[in-house]
Image: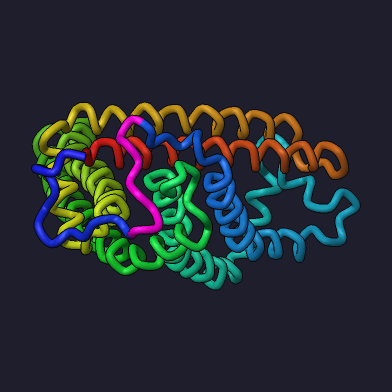
Amino acid sequence: MNRAFRPEGIAPARPEIVLLARSAIRARRRPGAVLVVWAWEALLGLAIGWPIASVAHRVYGSHPDGDAPVFRAGGLELLDLLAHSMAAGGPIACTVILVVLAASVAGLFPSAMLLASMTFVTRARTPPPLRAAMARASTAFAPSVTALLATRALQGVLLAVGLSLAKAASTLAVARSGEAAGDKALLAVVLPFVLACGVAGIVGDLARAAVIRFDARGGDALRVAARVFARAPLEVTWSYVWRAISGCVPLVFGALVAARIGGRAGVPLLALFVVHQSVTLVRVALQASWMASAVRALD
């Protein structure tokens, strides 16, 4: 590790585990930790999907084909389901929002365990035991929450300012040159703010990696992350972007399979479940690969 780049006030690693060399930090070397995060994502998906599925069951529970009609081409039955379940829309939306917000904070713990597993090793050169990874994740949880909240607050401000300026620019352009010019002005103004939000997200991930790597406090981690990104913005951004793009490929594949299989029960439904969980696992593995890259970038 480059000692000249370590900020003041950052403690060394705990004695029972030691830092891995930069080149050895790879997500593929910790498949068990990746599976733990995948299990968390699966439980989160169940918590979000359960209330939505319950509405479909109440509407189509007595139908001979179950909820298969909502998968039919054209989406007419799905639109009918949405139209007749608007009364449940508010509670469902609140439930989903609360679950997502709570999960975004609680999910920092399994993510920190994954980072600790990838970043450290015992003195016998074996993966850190679960107790040591959990201890490291517990210590990193509060600083990680601080980094997450700071990142989300910055993204919220950027989006609010961008949308306000874009709306004003669009209104002015429409008054002068018509709706087409207004749409172009809207896109031209809001796009830099959207990109800035993406950069803030990358810096936030780097900060969470710094919390684990250096046992840093939230503010220290954010400053280190900003310095790392400023030092190599193109390299760090590309490391994130190519994995994000790759993560869209399994999503498209899963959507095509779901459209092909539909909502049929039995073996097709089991196949759809396997495909869905495989897509989730691939995306979790890519996310773990990015976080390993973020840790390497810190050095």
Closer-to-camera residue (9/103): 9
The residue lying furthest to the front in this view is 124
Q: Judge whether residue 16 is colored magenta.
A: yes
Q: Is residue 226 above or below residue 299?
A: below
Closer-to-camera residue (275/228): 228
Which corner quadrant holds the N terminus? Answer: top left
Q: Quadrant of residue 24?
A: top left
Q: Judge whether residue 226 is colored magenta.
A: no
Position in image of residue 46 (x %, y %): 64, 58
Position in image of residue 276 (x %, y %): 65, 40
Position in image of residue 129 (x %, y %): 51, 55
Name the residue located 27 percent from the left edge and 65 percent from the top edge.
143
Which corner quadrant holds the C terminus? Answer: top left
Position in image of residue 263 (x %, y %): 77, 42
Name the residue located 67 percent from the left edge and 56 percent from the top edge.
81
Q: Quadrant of residue 51?
A: bottom right
Left or right of 69 on screen, residue 173: left
Name the residue located 76 percent from the left edge and 33 percent from the top edge.
261
Image: magenta residue range: 15-23
